[in-house]
Image (cartoon, helix red, strand yellow):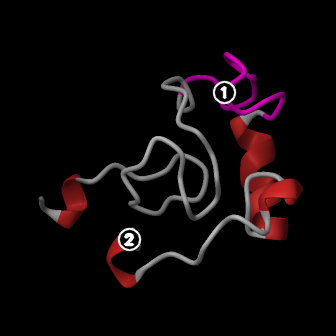
Amino acid sequence: MDRLSIPRCPCCGYRTGCATCPVCYWTHDGAAGRHSGTAVDGLNGERTLDEARLNYSIYGASARRYRDVVRPPRPDEHP
């Protein structure tokens, strides 16, 4: 599979191609691009995508509690 065909995580932007991103621990809910300021269906708790992006910039994870379960992006996952 071509690296550029792997979808980017809507939260951290890395190309992990996972339902739950191992780099930021955001779970793709299918509506992130359309409703970034609204928590859609509970897959990410009460966090909106906007909140998760802010958390990622501060903590390196979509929520502070996930700091210990995320990993750094691999070189092939960079946008």
Residue 77's disc number = 2
Left or right of 3 on screen, residue 10:
right
Side (left or right) of 73 relative to 68: left
Nearer-N-terminus badge (1/2): 1
- Label 2 sits on a secondary structure element that is helix
- Asked which quadrant contains residue 65, the reply is bottom right
On screen, residue 21 above or below 35: below
Give the residue drawn at x 58%, y 78%: 72
**Residue 70, horizontal then vertical, whole percent:** 66, 66
Residue range in magenta is: 34-47
Q: Which amino acid is tagged 1?
A: Leu
Number of residue marks: 2
Percent x, y of residue 47: 80, 35
**Dot 2, how many residues are within 10 Å of its Cα: few (below 14), some (14-19), or many (20+)?**
some
Which residue does the image show at 39% across and 60% down from the upper left? 15
Residue 52 position within the rendered picture, expressed as x and y whole percent measured from the top left: 75, 47
Q: Give the vertical position of 15 relative to 52 (above or below).
A: below
Question: Is residue 9 within the magenta segment?
Answer: no
Classified by dominant secondary structure, the portion drawn in magenta counts as loop
Q: Which mark is residue 43?
A: 1
